[in-house]
Structure formats: structure tokens, C-alpha cells
Amino acid sequence: MEAKATACFVRMSPRKVRFVLDTVRGKYAQEALDQLKFTPNHAAAEIAKVVNSACANAINNFEMSPDYLKIIRCYVDVGPTMKRVKPRAQGRAYRILKRTSHITVIVAEGEAPPRKTGRKTEKKPPLRAALPVPAEAAKAEEEPKAEEATAPAETTETTETAEAGE
């Protein structure tokens, strides 16, 4: 079962409306409305009205669940163009075309939308603790200890040889 809503004679160019419609095509209705809410385009508000109307039609007329509504088709058709005249230099007149659109959105019940789990709750260890100690740094730390241990041994050997030689 499908529910449909149409907004006719919207004073907006179909090309500009089509650009926004492409972003919400195939999405779940609630996800599409969330995206349209933050889209910085005048067409987004008009499309959001049509999506809300299509969802209301689905809920009231066909008793569909609002959580499972998905936009299966959405398109924009060209409406009548209003022709105006703007005076220009040297007595000329330029034509201005004020375009209109017919926006259509069709929703149907889909599968359950994917659940958002949110952020992970496990804490990450601090960055310094997570980094492995380079092998060169480990050797550099061990070498002074080895030198300290060998240094007294050398002094004792020289004293022993010196004592033996006397």
C-alpha cells in the first residue's frame, strides 16, 4: 500500500527542488525529515511539508506504522511559468520567467529501519600508554646500566693485575 502527497504550484524552480529531492530519495521518512531540517535550501522546507503530508496520509488513510514509512518515490514536475517583463536600457524589455513546480512524494511501509546504537561506551586508554616503546629506546635505557656494571669490574681487574705484577 502506498500513500501519496503532492504540492502544486510551488513558486520555485524545478531544477532547484530536484537537487534537494535527490538527497532524500529512498530514505526512511523520519530520517529524511531530520536531514531536510538542516538543509540550507529554501526547497527543503517545501519538501518537508510534502513528506509530512504523505506520512499523515499513510497513517490516517491506510493505518500504516509511522516508524516504518519509507520514501519509495519522489519527483518534481514543471508547473506553469509566469512570464513577466523587465524594462531595460534604450526602451528594450527583457522577459523574466518565474517558474513553478509540482512536488510529489510517495511513501510505503518498509522493513524496520536500522537502529542507531550511538557512541561506544568503552573508554580508550590514554595515547601515551597505548604507544609501544621503540626498540631503540629500550636498548638506550639498558646500555647505561650495562656500562655502569662493567665499569667497576674493569677497575678491579686493573687493580688485581697491578697487585699480581708487584
Image: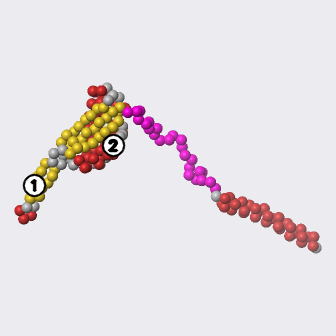
Q: Which residues are magenta?
A: 110-133
23 left or right of 148? left
Residue 46 image point, x, y percent: 24, 42
Q: Is residue 71 above or below residue 60?
A: below
- How packed mark 2 is, by other alpha carbons closer than 10 Å (few <14, some 14-19, many 20 or more), is many
Left or right: where does residue 69 sit relative to residue 120? left
Q: For the N terminus, which image quadrant?
A: top left
Residue visible at 43% across and 36% down in the picture: 114
Q: Amino acid at mark 2?
A: Val
Q: Residue furthest bottom?
A: 166
Which residue is identified by label 2?
24
Left of 146 or right of it: where is 107? left
Residue nearest the observer in this picture, 20 or 42: 20
Tag 1 and tag 2, C-beta contact below 8 Å: no
Element class at badge 2: helix
Residue topped by disc 1: 85
Q: Residue at x 93, y 73 (%)?
A: 165
